[in-house]
Each structure stands twice: as C-alpha cells, then as structure tokens.
Image (tube, rainbow, N blue to C red):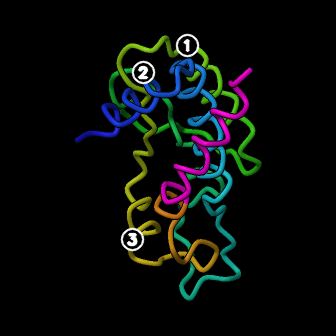
Amino acid sequence: MSFTLDLKEYVDKTGEDIVEVVQQTCIEVFTKIIMDTPVGKPELWKNKPPADYRAGALRANWQTSLNQQASGILNKRDKSGKRAINQMKTMVSKYDGLGSVVFTNNIDYASKIEYLGHSSQAPTGMVRVNVAAFQQAMDQAVKKVSP
C-alpha cells in the first residue's frame, strides 16, 4: 500500500481536509530537512574542499515541485535556508489535493551525505531522520487543521 492510499484512508476516517494536512505536513518535514542539510565548514573536513566548492549550494538545491521531479542544479547558495524554505512554501501552497508534492535535491554529493556519513554535521543524513518523524508531523498538521 502506498503512502497516498494510507493518507487517503486516514483522511476518510477522520474527515480532515487532505489538502491542508498535506500542506502542513510537507512544510514541517521539508523545513526540517532543509535546515538539517549541512552547510560546509571546510575547517571540519579531513581534505581540502574542491576548488569550485560553494558553501550553501547543497541547502540551496532543495527544490519543491508538483507532480514531477525538478531537474537540474541551481547555481545558488543559501546558507540560511530562507530561500529554499520560501520556494518550498510557495509550491506547497499550490497543492490542490491532486497529484503529489515532490521534494528533490539534484546535487551529486547529496546521497553521499545522506547515506555514507560524509558530513560530521549530519552523520545520519538529513532526509531519513526527518522522514522517520513524518507521522508525528502529520499528527500535528491534523491538530492544526481540526476545528
């Protein structure tokens, strides 16, 4: 069973507004992922950074889209995460209950940080730890939406 079916069943049982629940849950989980994404501190690295290294590029490349995965890499930096969060909130607010919200990072070293422990700032990754808290985020969203 897919998450979408589980969520639909949950919404059918509770009578909650699926659009608001999905929007609130996405904002909560995606914000945590963005903020847990390390911004490189070369002074912590075992090796020197590559010549083209740009601190904040990984965080800047969290892209939110509807119904299809974003392609390409953004040539931006976002050490604070504000730009990525604002872009994500704008896209999530356009979700109308049809299709899906897709959250992507196309930087090639994102998977090394997520799965191979390539960052002392995020030794257990940034996505898996927040997806594990997804149910809690959804429960909080339902409480916010409920009258």
In this rendered view, identify the residue nearer to me: 87 or 45: 87
x, y percent for residue 146: 69, 25
Q: How would you rate the neighbour count of disc 3 (Cα within 10 Å): few for under 14, some for 14-19, many for 20 or more?
A: some
Count of numbered labels shown in the rendering: 3
Horizontal side of 125 relative to 116 (left or right) equals: right
User: In the image, which disc is placed on residue 66?
Assistant: 2
Q: Which residue is mark 1?
A: 94
Q: Amino acid at mark 3?
A: Tyr
User: Is residue 17 rendered magenta in the image?
Assistant: no
Q: Which residue is mark 3?
A: 115
Q: Is residue 69 above or below residue 120?
A: above
What is the secondary structure assignment of the residue under circle 3? helix
> Is the stretch drawn in magenta largely helix, strand or loop?
helix
In this rendered view, identify the residue nearer to me: 48 or 31: 31
Q: Amino acid at mark 1?
A: Lys
Q: Picture quarter containing residue 41?
A: bottom right
Q: Is residue 5 above or below residue 121?
A: above
Q: Amino acid at mark 2?
A: Leu
Please provide the residue range marked out in magenta. 130-147
Say which label, 2 or 3, has the lower sequence index: 2
x, y percent for residue 119: 55, 75
What is the secondary structure assignment of the residue under circle 2? strand
Dot 2 and dot 1 residues touching (CB under 8 Å): yes
Horizontal side of 55 relative to 70 (left or right) equals: right
x, y percent for residue 2: 26, 39
